[in-house]
Amino acid sequence: MEEHYRAFKRRNLFRLSLTYLSPLLVLIIYLYIQYDGLMQESNRLHLRAIAESQANTLDLFLEERRINLSNLIDDPRFKMPPSPETIQANLEKLKRASGAFVDIGYFDSTGVQIGYAGPYPSLEKRNYSSEPWYITLKHEPDEFIITDIYRGFRDQPHFTIAVSRFINGEFAVLRATLSPDRIHEYLSSLEGSQEVFSSIVNTDGYFQVVTEQLGTPLEQSNIIPPQNPLIGSDEHEGKPDQTTAAVGAGSNTYAYAWLRGVKWAVIVQSSSTTGGSIFSGFRLRIILTSAVVVLVIFLIINNRANKLVQWQKESDETRDQLEHAAKMASVGELAAGIAHEINNPLAVINEEAGLMKDLMNPEFEETETIEQLTGHLDTIQQSVFRCRDITRKLLGFVRRSAADLKPHDIHRLIDRVVDGLLGPELAVSNVEVIKRYGPDIPEITTDENQLQQVLLNIVNNGVDALEERPGQISLATACEKGKFLISITDTGKGIPPDELDKIFLPFFTTKEVGKGTGLGLSVSYGIIKGLGGKIEVESSVGQGSTFIISLPLK
Amino acid sequence: MANIKLLIVDDEVKFLESIARRLEMRDFDVTTAANGAEAVKAARAAGFDLALLDLKMPGMDGKQVLELLKKEHKYLEVIILTGHGSVDSAVECTKLGAFGYLPKPYELEELLAVLQQAYEARMKKKFESNQAKLDEITRLAIGSSPLGIMRELAKLDDKEK
């Protein structure tokens, strides 16, 4: 029973939730997506601005470095080959201009480093003529090159800025190497760079300058920005790295800006602190508010569902009480009926027994024959059987709950009653039985004995109602709207309208004393109700009566 | 003492037969009726001292018969015999003028005792009534002409029926 109510509550909760929560959830999700798009767009614009500004700054920085070098080589006092002091002094000069300079070297037209100052003195006298940057620079009309990062002879990531001149008709090159670390430091020092991870990649997507959170220089980046347009933003495919994943929206978003002076692109990604803390606060508020609203609605729904269960329980209890009251009333009625019906035969027995005692009393001087005495004893026995009939039928009331349900061929069941049980009697009493069985009647799950008892009662009543013989009893079956119907029609005297509503009452009978107990129809009614069906009756006086039993098909 | 004239009304024929026989053996002058209409007819045909009446009968039921008998026969005492014994119906029947109410089945001695009481009650009532009639006659005899007395007596006789 409790389980039944729990299921009822679950159903209600589900239904109410569907009704009230789902539109709300859809709305929340819609707003959230809208907001998310907005936030991503804003994030993208923000990143682009940073990328653009960093690219500009970097362009300026590299241009400055080129000018530093150009100034040195264009110095009118400069002579090839330079003296080691000059070289050292020039390196000092460069380092003052920018800490990114690592070393400095001079090359003659054969590509040999003829002068060097810096931390790798072993590089002096090396031949660079087959180095890609040297070859390129030789054919460079701008007399200037900035290389991508490479490891070179020193086996350390660095990049080269070199300028070339013809000094006294001789091809000469001044080159300086710069450390990507210092560039990175420089980038990090720029405004707005704390919110983002910046990196620089070349056209092939190799890191030139990078924060250690993203990778190391010369590593392949998972982002290769498009060449066109020069500034833009996009989603990168690879999985978002952990730090950016924390931001949620925009974790795959990056902005890039190509440098003008060199084929490098600045790539800017949100770091964990970016995405706009004001935005994430706003997002949190949306989620919290939605959660609170959903919770409140759910609590209301839960409360409502509990109420419904309580109402259901109360109405069930009321119905139970009503049923119990109805049962008690019918028990009361029954008890009164039983008292009367049994007291009468008891009174007969009492009188007969008393009479026989009187007859045997010599005081009265009666002379009764054996036959006469037997007659009195017969009356006593008849009365006893009347009492027994009543008690037996009463058991029908009691036993009807324990129905023995099995599938039955209903037509054969009816045949067993009208042909088998009642057949000889019907034939003798000149009653014709007409069967109009419907086609395609499935097997009906029912209690054979109980249903036979009902049919027996109704057919017997029909026969008793037939005043003119020969009479007819028709039995018809049909299936209709998930119900199985049996109708039993007699051509008897019919039931007056004022008795129609009494015929199912216990002990209501119109038959002579001792002929009917008044229990047949009320027991039948109880049985059919117990089997989940009902009995209806139609009758018109002088025409006959029809009893219709309907039983559930399943 | 003359035999008590008794009417028994019950739809249970076997009961009727045996109770009638037993009471006849006890010197009652018994008439039986199997339903209300028969009972009323019998009572109209012959005056009875007492009546035993069943309540639940087809056709006219016991209470209707009781009302009718009491209306039509001033001194008739009616005793209700019923298997449908309940306090409510007993009270109702007493209000309608029944002398006694005996639930079935009963001991014959009980019935005989009630019949005795009822008969005595009837006799007493009749005696009182006769006394009143006597007083009236005496009053008339003293103050009226013989012709007036005759007329008044005829009136009293009418009343008694």
Image: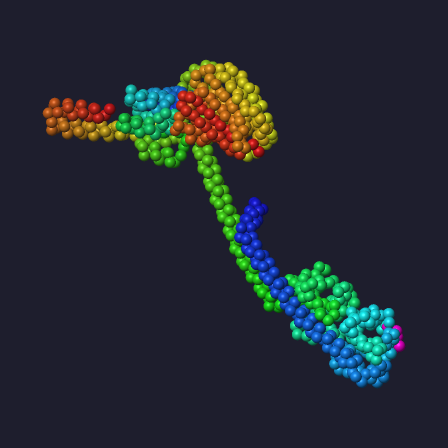
Q: Is residue B91 visible?
A: yes
- The quadrant in which the N terminus of chain A is found is top right
- Boundaries of the magenta span: A124-128
Front residue of A174 and B49: A174
* Quadrant of residue A372 within the rendered picture: top left
Q: Is residue A155 visible?
A: no
Front residue of A530 and B4: A530
In percent of width and height, residue A105 lies at: 83, 78
Instruction: Give the colour scheme shown.
Output: rainbow
Q: Residue at x 52, y 26 (%)?
A: A486
Q: From the viewer's perspective, is A153 left or right of A415?
A: right
Q: Residue at x 72, y 67 (%)?
A: A265
Examine the residues drawn in magenta and state their main secondary structure. loop
Image mark count = 0
Q: From the viewer's perspective, is B148 left or right of A544?
A: left
Front residue of B17 and A184: A184
Q: Is residue B51 above or below residue A60?
A: above
* Quadrant of residue A242 within the rendered picture: bottom right
Q: From the viewer's perspective, is B121 left or right of A121?
A: left
Q: Residue A126: say if magenta.
A: yes
